[in-house]
Image (spheres, rainbow, N blue to C red):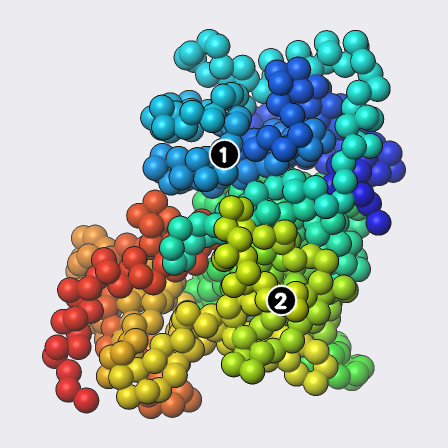
Amino acid sequence: MFVSIPHMLEATIREYPDNLALKMKKGDQFVEYTYRKMGQTIRRLARALDALGLKSGDKIAILSNNRPEWTITDFAVLVLRGVVVPIYQTLPPNQIAYLLHDSETRAIFVENEEQYQKILAIKAHLPQLQFIFSIDPLPQPPDIMDFEQLCRRGQQFGQVDPEQYNHWLAAIQPDDICSLVYTSGTTGAPKGVMLHHRGFITDILEAEAVLNLRPDDVFLSFLPLSHLYERLAGHWCPMLRGASIFYSQGISTVIDDIAIAHPTVIVSVPRLFEKIAAKVLTQVDESSYLKRKIFYWASRTGRRYHDAKYKGRPGAWLAHRYRLADKLVFSKIKAKLGGRLRYPIAGGAPLSVETLKFFEALDTRIIEGYGMTETHLIITLTPYGKTKYGSCGKPIGQVEVRIADDGEVLVKGPTLMAGYYNLPEVTRETIDSDGWLHTGDIGYLDHEGYLFLTDRKKNIIVTSGGKNIPAARVENLLKTSKYIDDVCLIGNQRNFISALIIPNFETLTAWAQQHQLSFHNNPELVDHPAVIGLIAEEIDVLQIELARFEKVKKFILLAEPLSIDRGELTPSLKIRRAVIEQKYKAEIDQLYESVLE
């Protein structure tokens, strides 16, 4: 058991000094850090921050896209027993001001001029913010020290007292608060979650017992490091084993980056995997009759083969057919995913069963997980090759899960947070006197200990007729349509269920062009009677097995995706229902005015 996250990294540096740790494409060049070089840079930066007067307990924020300097800064602050405050890079200045003020942040690293200007606009309201550093050099003003300048200064200080770094490591305690991570805030203001080394280390080691990562693994990093999912599962877990992390150039370039990085593991929210599956199926549907026949034969064969493999040994004839399917179809899809993908890891939201089966047919099994910031992330993981459709896996070691009388999922163990920053009353409401954390999720455990989530307590829609409807279950069902990207169910205290639907504009546009519809932009596309009819048919087919009171009876097609910048989504891409319902209140009211039940 390691004392802290920096101690874990030091062990990896000793064992795998020459392994590639971090890699990023910058222009036409690649920036690379071995574990040895990464360790040296962390030491230099930590010494520079110490020399400037930053000390144990100081809050230091990072406002940047994913890049090697983000991770190096993270570790340098941890070594000094500082508290890292990650900030999502697309937040507007007013929201950043709230986080910096609430956390009492003393220093911040900004990525570039754009992020610096955000801080400049709010600095007058943040008297406790004493230091601003940049990662990229800034054109103005010259008195802002950048990452390279800090490292050069730290190198000079290291020559004066080379043992100081080891003294810092020795001072770190397992229960030190090392990070203040703000919840997404789907309702109300974000809360700062106080996290400690003991919780992180327990989570990493117990997760690794399930994941079985390797030193030659390559992770693709594109989810924001400001979110704990990427920071722990996408960085610290692979670092435990000396694996490599390749930084994507952005969410829009992920597919291209996969072709460059050839990852063995991809950590993502389900939407990426669902979009990959949808894109393949769209290309198949647009191909020749023969190619479509071959693909769907291969898909059925793949599913039968892996179902038989899961239950025991598949027969020789089925195995032969699967090898042929792999040669004709699956190998080509896997090549587009880099050719080396061992398994994807999905979390943050439920993954559709159809997407799971799509990847299983390729012999690429997705590991699903469930977690939350308040538990240092991971609560459950699916054991590799032991998927139960609809489940998010079994509790990792040292973590207890039980179901309360009202169906709420409760969690207990050494991975629980220290509490919410400056919110003792809210902390007591979340963690009861017996030490159980109330997650706010509704679910159940089966006889083998697999956890199945049905919805958030706050997302249970209660109709005016008193019917309880789990919104997420219906929404996830509708999102299996290749024409639907996202759904927000409506109906609380209403007499029937309706929905705001965000189309998948790529597939919908292709369908409209194929059917020679006349439109010039997205608003005209979603208002077209043929498009409305198409979505209505999709909904009717998908919800055929739902109870009558659960079915969506009316819907509105939105002309643009939901946005983090407009406050419709949290930084972790969860829907802020109250914001959306308020924004589209007039349109929603009109739906209900025109229908009598």
Name the secondary structure under disc 2: loop
As rendered, which of 314 and 432 lies closer to the eye?
432
Foreground mark, 1 or 2, reads: 2
Q: Are marks 1 and 2 in contact (CB under 8 Å)?
A: no
Residue 214 x, y percent position in the rendering: 80, 50
Taking 503 as reference, is 114 above or below it? Answer: above
Taking 33 as reference, is 51 above or below it? Answer: above
Name the secondary structure under disc 1: loop
Q: Going 16% across and 71% down the picture, which residue do you hit?
A: 589
Q: Going 39% across and 58% down the picture, which residue do you hit?
A: 187
The local crowd at label 2, few if under 14, some if 14 to 19, many if 20 or more residues have their Cα within 10 Å, is few
- Three-letter amino acid code at the position of disc 2: Ser
The circle on residue 433 is 2
Relative placement, left or right, of 303 versus 588 is right
As rendered, which of 519 and 56 lies closer to the eye?
56
The local crowd at label 1, few if under 14, some if 14 to 19, many if 20 or more residues have their Cα within 10 Å, is some
Residue 153 x, y percent position in the rendering: 66, 11
The circle on residue 414 is none
In the current view of this chain or complex, which residue is farthest to the left? Answer: 594
Q: Going 66% across and 65% down the picture, which residue do you hit?
A: 435
Q: Going 45% across and 76% down the picture, which residue do you hit?
A: 473
The circle on residue 104 is 1
